[in-house]
Image (tube, helix red, strand yellow):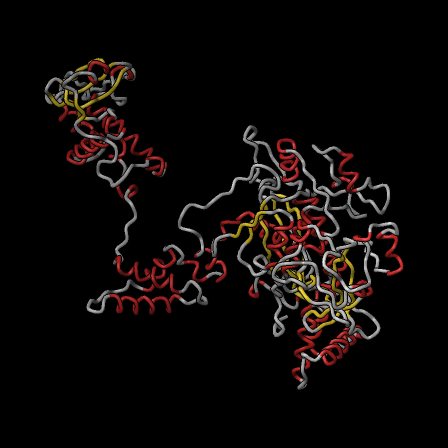
Amino acid sequence: MRKSQLCVQVGSKIRYDGEVHVVTGFAGAVMEMRDPRGRLNRRATVEVLTSESFGLLERIEGRDTNGPTFIDNVPAATLNAAQVLAAHVMEAITGYKSGTRADAKIDEPLPGFDPETTTLTERIRAKAAELNMAFRTLWAKKSRYEQYGLYGLIDRRVTRLATSMVDERVKEAIRTVIDSLENASNPTKMKIRRLVEKELKTAYPNEIIQLPSNTSFNRLLDSMPKGSELFGPAKRRRSIANRPDTPYSHFAATRPGEMLAIDSTPFDAFAMDPYSYEWVQIQLTIALDIFTRSVVAWRFTPVSTKGVDAALLLYDTVRPKAMQQDWPDSIAWSYCGVPESIVVEVGGDGKEESSPRLAAVPFLHPESVIVDRGRVFLSEAFSRACNDLGINLFVARPYTPTDKAHVERVFRTIRERFVENLAGYKGPDVYSRGLDVEKEAYWFIDEIESEFALWVATFWQPRHHDGLSLPHVPDLNISPNNMYEEGIARAGFVYVIPDQRLFYDLLPTKWVSIQHYGVELRRLRYDGDILNDFRGEKSPYLGEHAGKWPIRYDPRDRSTAFFYDPLLDKWHELKWTGHSGLLRPFNEKTISYAKAHILKNGGNPSNHAELEKALNELLNRIEDRQMEGGRERRIAAVNNMNAAAAARDRPRGNEAYEPDAESSLVGIDAPVATQRSTKPAKAGVFQVDEDALEAFPTVDEVDEDADDDLDI
């Protein structure tokens, strides 16, 4: 039995000593009740409740409602009027407005309300005359008060639940139509009304169901779930439709780096290419640490993010962030919780320009990352990068943005607090865009990166975050940097010094044979002195690509490829042999555009000579700033931005291979088994560690840009 059913209060009807009594009040441990003849009886409350003859005949609360009553939801004026009326009713029933003699006022009972000299009917009649109310009306209120307490004196029009006179079949038809328009363009309310009529005729062909008036129909449509979203942004409507019906899942991270959320979003501002001075759209990709809410890495890419960009974003998470020269000293890293000597060894003491101080932006080695099902994050480049770094990869459920709601909320803050303050802000959609905003786009992509890094260090990281708290100090304002320091103090600090060769490990791989002309990657040929001793030889690698050599390349700059020498344990650069005297960077889009240009002129893009000629002519036009048409200008802008990004990521100090310097690398007195042989290879000449083979994938890299993909 529920607790409300056992509640004994003023007005309760109880069975005691074989008679029905009405409780009229309590005075300390004494219960006052009235028997059927109107006489007052006073008994100890414990005696009554423990008596074998006791029984509660009716529960008071909410008897005439379909659920619990909520008096605190009643307007204050209505509640005050009910309390005043309750005092009058109690005076008519007991002679005292408080309901008990123990709390009587000095002048109580008043003449005409003394229970010793008057009957209940006389008191009710006197009170009705005093309140200018009909006797039957007051008697009915007295009955409701005895049955339901104070709730019985409140106007039912205030407490009743809202009801609708609309046929439930009409509501169901509206829900069906709303669900069918989830991915459609925004409709009008008149169109929805016509669709509802059609749905009703289809579902109930033999019945005539009347729709409410236009005003009532529109009001009903706005009040229904997802109804009002039909007339707002379509993207928001689809996002709301993807909300799960079950409770949201929440991942509770317990230490820094335990889980990172990575995602990309279009950047709502235009950037300008510093070479061609053409504006381009860019994307922002960030890595957010769930435990600290720290933005630990970010990348700006022109047009769209590629697999190699997402892979190198993981590389950025483990690298310290250096302060720029014009940054204030207040955002230098305070080394709280980390021995300074360890970090200075890595980041420098800031006394020389070559060793800048570290900025107050965390760096860590992630244990796991969660991404959506975008092509970038499902690419082999990104999955292999996670494998090489020892990171667990989790993929969010399809159409479930709540699986990584933290990073989605960060994107909103970035737009509201950072992007809107930049010249060239274009808004999240065409309806929010200003007139000719690209004319204000005086930001180069490297300048936007610099401004964003400063914003992260000065605004996001030291700012109080509502989603962060400490269990033992719940009211303490915590910033992402504070949470990072607290996590280090509890879980420790593990810093993995990033190897420069990790850059090459994160690049796509192509398994090829080494010919007399070098190697060929997608109709482009590369060569270098390092290949002189390997031409025509089979590689020592086993597996699916047995006999072939792994060549890695950066899709952002295809002018160079990279060859790994297993004997010297070093990566070497291979240059594109088709350049016209000057090696200039170009990306996958540039190659695709050159092939399309050949096809347009009736040529064969598979012919090496034609492809080299078309590609050099395109690079010449880009260099001379003589691009043909808007598409070619955008090709040039994206090409230059990609080349700059690839140059920044490429490790420094990788000298070109010189055959004469070979003896100093290998050693004159080195064992014969470790020296390079200029003779044809024999079995057992190259001794390759089996563990080293795992650094190279066994499947070809799936290129993300098909040759015919010319969308810029």
Of residues 670 and 663, the one drawn nearer to the viewer in this rendering = 670
Figure quadrant of residue 459: top right
What is the x, y in percent for residue 430? 57, 66
- Where residue 85 sits in the image (x, y, percent)? 27, 31
Q: Kindly identify the residue that appears in the image at 70 percent across and 62 percent down.
A: 549
Farthest-out residue, bottom: 602
Asked if residue 551 can be seen in this view, the reply is no
> 287 or 68, which lies in front?
287
Q: Does the rendering let one see residue 210?
A: yes
Q: Quadrant of the C terminus?
A: bottom right
**Quarter of the rendering containing residue 534:** bottom right
Q: Position of residue 573 (x, y in %)?
A: 78, 62
Instruction: Name the residue nearer the viewer: 116 or 23.
Output: 23
Q: Is residue 92 above or below residue 603?
A: above
Q: Residue furthest front?
A: 683
User: Is 527 left or right of 126, judged from the image as shown?
Assistant: right
Image point 32% across, 35% down: which residue? 71
Depth check, front residue: 504 or 454: 504
In the rendered image, the quadrant that contains the N terminus is top left
Q: Residue at x 23, y 32 (%)?
A: 148
Vertical order, 320 against 615 (above or below): above
Q: Position of residue 624 (x, y in %)?
A: 80, 75
- Give the side of residue 654 with respect to residue 212, left or right: right
